[in-house]
Amino acid sequence: MTNNHKKDILIVDDLADNLRVLSQILVEKNYQVRKAINGKTAIRAAQIAPPDLILLDIKMPEMDGYEVCQILKSNHKTAEIPVIFISALDDTLDKIKAFEVGGVDYVTKPFHVEEVLARIESQLTIQRQKQQLQKEIEQRKYTEEILHQSRAVLSSVLNSSLDGIAAIQAVRENATGNIIDFRCLIVNPVIAKVLGKDKSDLIGKIGIRKIIEKFDDKLFHSIIEVVETGKPLTTDLYYQCDSLKYWFHFIAVKLGDGCAVTIKNITHRKETELELKKINLDLETFSRSVVHDLRNYINNINFAGSLLEEEIDNKGSDNEKELIEIINTSCERTMKVLEGITHLSQLKIESIKPISFNLSQLVKEILNYLQNQEQRINFSSKIQDDVMINADRKLLNIAIENLIKNAWKYTQKKEETIIQFGEIKPTEKLWNNKIELANISSIRFKNKSIYYIKDNGIGFNPELADQLFIPFKKLHKDTSFEGSGIGLSIVKRIIELHEGEIWAESQLNKGAIFYFILGI
């Protein structure tokens, strides 16, 4: 026997000697054996615990083997149990009747042990194969049902999607194996409508190359590269049909020996972007023109003030000298404001060029420069070593310089200046705490560090924190601290260009901490 599980065989015979002999033979061959001395007992035993096979005698009192077999086959619980008749009856009609009532084999007494064992094993093998086949049929039905449901869901998604969806298969040249075209396997109504065709005109058809090249003559070869390399393709396409003009966002992903294609109509968004770009360009030109003219006017005022100062020299009254100082100071501050406007206008929404560099080193260089420019006796810094960051170095240099100059400015009236810089990694408990307090998505910035610059300056009213990054908005009087009020606006714009967030925490006279996190 190939199966380690003991097969359960029920022997039905009214003669005790027959039961004993058959039972001994089968037990020696590692079968599990049960015995029944009449038909009723056999039927009850089979219904309580169906055996794998039944050896059934025909000649028995009260209920013969034929009737027992008929009853077993009429019950769904016992109908599939194979029944082998073992009988002294040798007439052909007896054998025919045995098969008619549901028997699967017939052994004539006296029997040969080898023959009985061979027939038992043969029927058990057939039974195992039937059970296996039944399982496979059930699994296939289940799979077909799942497939049917999946197709229905896919069809529903395809037909209801607002985006164009298609699947194409490569058509290769036999001699070289090179892709010469594509065959359309799946297409939804959106793509068909864009192409001005019915789905039936596309599905299963070759000639997709001509359609693809209508969008872009280089697109066909780009899709071939997707199939051959497995690298996805994402691009924006311009398409004109008659007098109508469209923009589509096109995505191609390798699927077997072909591609899954998605196109999204972004015409409205693209037109808006182009219009905004034109407006921004006009505003930038206008801003440069205004700043240029204002600089000239301010320089003229400043020059006139200088001449007036030389004219009155020591002869002028204190009031006149004070007025000249106001003119010069106002000109200087106005020039700084204009410089800030110029910097802010130059921060266009364009692709940045991130590289990895040592942010700790940059912070140290800026602090050394400030200390050389304005020596402070009681100055100390605490800079975390070797904090590496991936960002546009030129832009982030501007942002960090503004943040440190901000800390430097608001600590100038303290007896001691303390400036700190560090990194809070996503693995630290403090990271979650800061993200939650800032009301920022932890999923959006998963695995991104938070960086901070802390000072012991005069701080600010925490209720005004939302006004920190507004251009020209100052939380302290000009008479106390000079500045254009645009530095932090520039910082915020740079952080946003890096898809990040910046925020601050403070209490009056207890210093301030600026935090930022980058999304790239």
Image (spheres, rainbow, N blue to C red):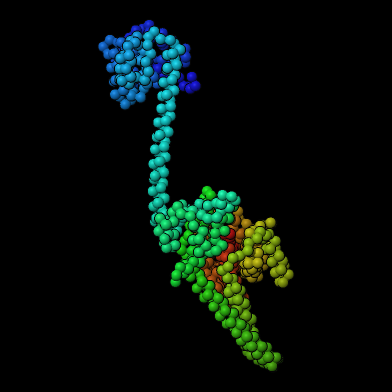
Q: Based on the displayed image, in which of its 4 quarters is residue 111 positioned?
A: top left
- Relative depth, front residue between 254 and 177: 177
* Residue 499: percent from left, percent from top: 56, 62
* Residue 22: percent from left, percent from top: 41, 10
Q: Based on the displayed image, in which of its 4 quarters is residue 453 positioned?
A: bottom right
* Residue 213: percent from left, percent from top: 52, 62
Please indicate, yes or no, whether residue 106 appears anywhere in the rendered image: yes
Q: Residue at x 33, y 10 (%)?
A: 89
Please indicate, yes or no, whether residue 20 appears anywhere in the rendered image: no
From this viewpoint, which residue is outermost toward the left?
Answer: 62
- Relative depth, front residue between 71 and 285: 71
Residue 325 falls left or right of residue 138: right
* Residue 44: percent from left, percent from top: 31, 18
Q: Residue at x 52, y 52 (%)?
A: 171
- Relative depth, front residue between 10 and 369: 10
Q: Based on the displayed image, in which of its 4 quarters is residue 57 positioned?
A: top left
- Relative depth, front residue between 328 and 355: 355
Q: Is residue 186 above or below residue 235?
A: above
Q: How many marks?
A: 0
Q: Residue at x 40, y 49 (%)?
A: 153
Q: Residue at x 57, y 82 (%)?
A: 290
The C terminus sits in image quarter: bottom right
From this viewpoint, which residue is outermost toward the front?
Answer: 175
